[in-house]
Amino acid sequence: MINELITNHSWFLYITVALFSLAIGSLLNVVIYRLPLMLKQEWIREYCELMNIEEEKTQTVNLFFPRSFCPSCKTMIKAWQNIPILSYLFLRGRCYQCKSPIPVRYPLIELGTMLLSLYACWHFGFSFQLLFALIGLWLLICLFFIDLDHQLLPDSITLSLLWLGLIANTANLFTPLAEAVLSAAGAYIGLWIFIKLFYLVTGKIGMGNGDFKLFSAFGAWFGWKFLPLVLLFSSIFGTIIGLLYLYLHDKSKDTTIPFGPFLCVSGVATLFWGQEILNWYLHLWM
């Protein structure tokens, strides 16, 4: 029955994935906004316990409470005002109550999530590979924007991505399991040693521990063959974008620029086109 549905009614499956991924994109917006707040609350609580001081009472924030609200007027957003993309267009990009502008990033994340999910469907077909690829893509979208906003790669996401890759490769979906395990360990240790040596030579911190864990996650997904590709792409892309950012915003060369978003983009490129790029590169030199 499932094979018949995939063969004869693939259009229905694409529509289902499109609608579902739009809803996921809306959820990702919540995670991107609220997870850093949740981590901040946790860190403040731990600090107060460690220092034996009374914690200032604030409203608890998690992924489900309180309900979505306008950051400007604090009015709760009704269900019809929270439909992915359509509500933004209907409201003309403004809060229904106070008319404050709604960041265009919200519908763009929803749209981007849908387009990446549909491309993954076309690329992998309706398979177990697709299931893991979709979850991996959604996690990378969260990491991209959280690191862009806060220079933070939460362990709850990077480690979930790492374990997801290892679970996927118990069935050799992307690379053999033994290679995935060794590549994950080697990626973390190798990058950690390189950055420590960089610090000893220059006295500067090149990247944070979150970047090591994200790079390790790519080792768990793709194996060691693609790790140089991920690092090369992210370094080139990061250098170009970083220099443009410093120039256009008149920033000093010591300005900190998050590396995680470039790793995420490289990871997505490797997921979809890694083998083709690797073949092209090897052909270029052989």
Image (spheres, rainbow, N blue to C red):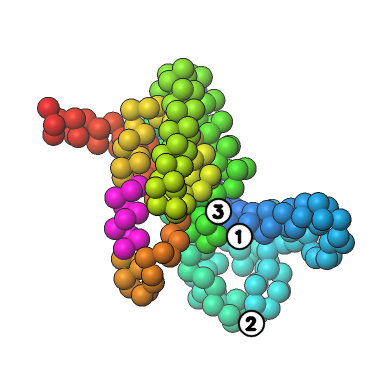
Q: Earlier in the sequence, mark 2 or mark 3?
A: 2
Q: Give the residue type that dot 3 points to.
A: Leu
Distance from the alpha carbon under mark 1 to that under mark 2? 20 Å
Nearer the observer: mark 2 or 3; the answer is: 3
Badges 1 and 2: C-beta atoms under 8 Å apart? Answer: no
Q: Quadrant for the C terminus, please.
A: top left
Q: Residue at x 65, y 72 (%)?
A: 70
Can I make out residue 237 in this image?
Answer: yes
In the rendered image, residue 235 lying in the magenta stretch gets the answer: yes
Q: Which mark is residue 86?
A: none
Q: Residues within 10 Å of mark 1 (few under 14, many from 20)?
A: some
- Residue 243 falls left or right of residue 199: left
Q: Residues within 10 Å of mark 3 (few under 14, many from 20)?
A: many
Percent across and percent down for residue 276 are: 25, 33
Nearer the observer: mark 1 or 3; the answer is: 3
Residue nearest the observer in this picture, 30 or 150: 150
Q: Which residue is mark 2?
A: 98
Distance from the alpha carbon under mark 2 to that under mark 3? 31 Å
Q: Give the residue type that dot 2 points to.
A: Cys
In the rendered image, residue 165 lying in the magenta stretch gets the answer: no
Q: Which residue is mark 3?
A: 152
Which residues, given as a range, are shown in magenta?
234-243
Q: Give the residue type that dot 1 points to.
A: Tyr
Establish if 102 lies above or below 262: below
Element type where label 1 sits in the image: helix
Q: Which mark is residue 33?
A: 1
Element type where label 3 sits in the image: loop
- Residue 60 falls left or right of residue 146: right
- Residue 175 falls left or right of residue 27: left
Residue nearest the observer in this picture, 67 or 249: 249
Percent across and percent down for residue 26 are: 57, 56
